[in-house]
Image: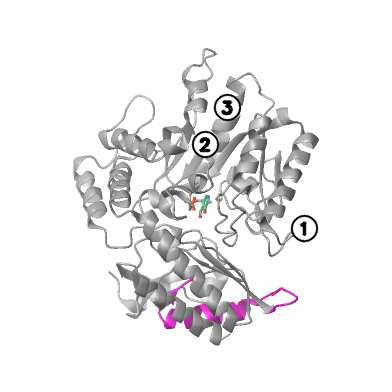
Amino acid sequence: MKDENFLKENNARHLWHPMGAPGDLQSNTPKIITGASGVSITDIDGHSTVDAVGGLWCVNLGYSNDVVKEAIAKQLYDLPYYSAFAGTSNPPAIEASYAVREFFAEDGMGRVFFTSGGSDSVETALRLARQYHRLRGEPTRTKFISLKKGYHGTHFGGASVNGNNRFRINYEPLLPGCFHLPSPYTYRNPFNETDPAQLAQNIAAAFEDEIAFQGANTIAAFIMEPIQGAGGVIVPDASFMGLMREICDRHGILMISDEVITGFGRTGDWSGARHWGVQPDLMTTAKGITSGYFPVGACLISEAVAEVFEKDNSGEAGIYHGYTYSAHPVGAAAVIATLAETKRLDLKSNAAARGTQLYEGVLKLAEKHDIIGDVRGGHGLMTGIEIVSDKPAKTPMDGATMARIHQTAYEAGAMVRLGMHNILMSPPLTISEGEIDTILSALDAGFSAA
Ligand SMILES: Cc1ncc(COP(=O)(O)O)c(C=O)c1O
C-alpha cells in the first residue's frame, strides 16, 4: 500500500465520491478507513470507533465474520465468475436462490432475481411490475406511486420514485408517470398531524384520491420502505403498511416493499413487511444479503406474480433485463454464508433488544439536550435524531454545527451518519450492550459540543 501521506494527499484528487461535491471533498478530506474488527472501524491515524453506521446500513454481521470471508475466498478459487444470462448457471447461484427464497417464504416470496445492489433491485422490481401488467393484458398500467422522504436508490427509475428532491433535481427530467404521497412523518407533514394512526389514515385517503385522479388502470405499482431509512428513519404507525396493502389490492396495484435496509433482521424481524404483518408482491433487497462483504442485491417475486410470467402463453414473458454480475458465483457464495450466519446468530433478536436500548438511550439524551427536536426508532437497530436550532420553531440545525457534532462524537468513540440535519444510526446487528453505551456517550459529547 502507498504511504499515509500519499493517501491523504491524493484521496479526493482523483477519486470522486458518491453523495458529495468533488470540490468540497478536496478541501475537507474524508476520513480514510483502513481496518475494522467486530463492530469497530479504525482510520488512517489509528483512531478506533464503534461504527454506528454499519458501513452504510449494511454490515449486519460486523466486520469479523470469517465464515463469510472464507466462503468468498473459496469461491474465488472454484469459479470466480460466469454469466447467468439465460443459458448458463452456477452452483452457488442455485443454492443462494434456494436459501433466499426460504428466508422470505413467510413473506410469500417465491422467486429470486439477483442483482448487484439496491438500485439494481429497485430497477428490476419497477420493470417486472410493468411487464406483469402487460402479460395480464393491462398494458396501460405503467405509473408508479411512492412516498415523499422515501429513498429507492439512484438509477433513473429509483430516482423517479425517490421522495427527496436532493436526489432528483440535478438529474431531471426523470421518468414520467411517477407520483408521490406524503410521508408518515409525524414531526413534519402537510396535515399538521402528530398522531401516527391518524396520519396513516390521512395518507391512505390521499392514496385513494390519487388513484381516483390517475385512474387505477394506469398504475403499475406502489413502492415503499417499511421504515424509511435514508429519509431520516421515519417509522410509520403499525397500521400504515397494511392500509396501503389493502388499497393496492382493491385497485390491482402491485405493492413493492423496498427492504434494502429493513431486510435480514434490522427491524427486529426478518423483513420490514413481516414486522408490519404485510405480504408484498415484490421485495427489493441488498446490503444485509451479504453483510456488505460483496456487492449483491435481489429482487424477490411473489408466487402469484411469478405464475403470470411462468404460465405465459403470449411469448412476451422474456425478462430482457439483468446485469453482468446478476447471480455472480462469488456473490452467491457470500449470500449463502451470510444467510446461514444471520440465522445462526439470530440477528433479529439482538437487533430488537439493542435497538430498544439505543432508542431509549437517545430519548434520555433528548431530555438533556434541547437541540434534539425528534427521536425516531424503537423498531430494531434503526435510530434517527433530528437536530434543530430552535425547538418550538423546529428550525433545522445548520451544517457547520452538524459537522461539529459529528466530529466530536467520532473523537469520543462513535461514527454516526449525517443526513442533512438528521443523525442516522444503523450499527451492525451483532453489537453488544456495552458498545451501544459507547455510542450513547459519544453522542452526548457531540451534542454538548453543538
Ligand atoms: C431503501 C433503499 N433502496 C435502495 C437503495 C439503493 O441501494 P444501493 O445503494 O445498493 O444501490 C438504498 C440504499 O441505501 C436504500 O436504502
Q: Amino acid under label 1?
A: Pro
Name the image quarter holding residue 210. top right
> Can residue 7 be seen?
no
Given the image, on which type of amino acid does mark 3 rest? Gln
Report if the beta carbon of the residue with label 3 is closer than 8 angstroms to ligand 1. Answer: no
Point out residue 91 in the picture as x, y percentages from the top left corner: 26, 33
User: Mark 2 or 3 closer to N-term?
Assistant: 3
Residue to which mark 1 is pinned: 190
- Name above or below for residue 246 compared with residue 3: above
Q: Are marks 2 and 1 in contact (CB under 8 Å)?
A: no
**Which region shows up in magenta?**
390-416
Q: Which residue is mark 2?
A: 282
Mark whose residue sits in front, 2 or 3: 2
Left or right, 141 with reference to 381: right
Residue that extends furthest to the right in the rendered view of this protein: 213
* Number of other residues with Cα within 10 Å of mark 3, as a class: few under 14, some 14 to 19, many 20 or more: many
Return the residue at label 3.
131
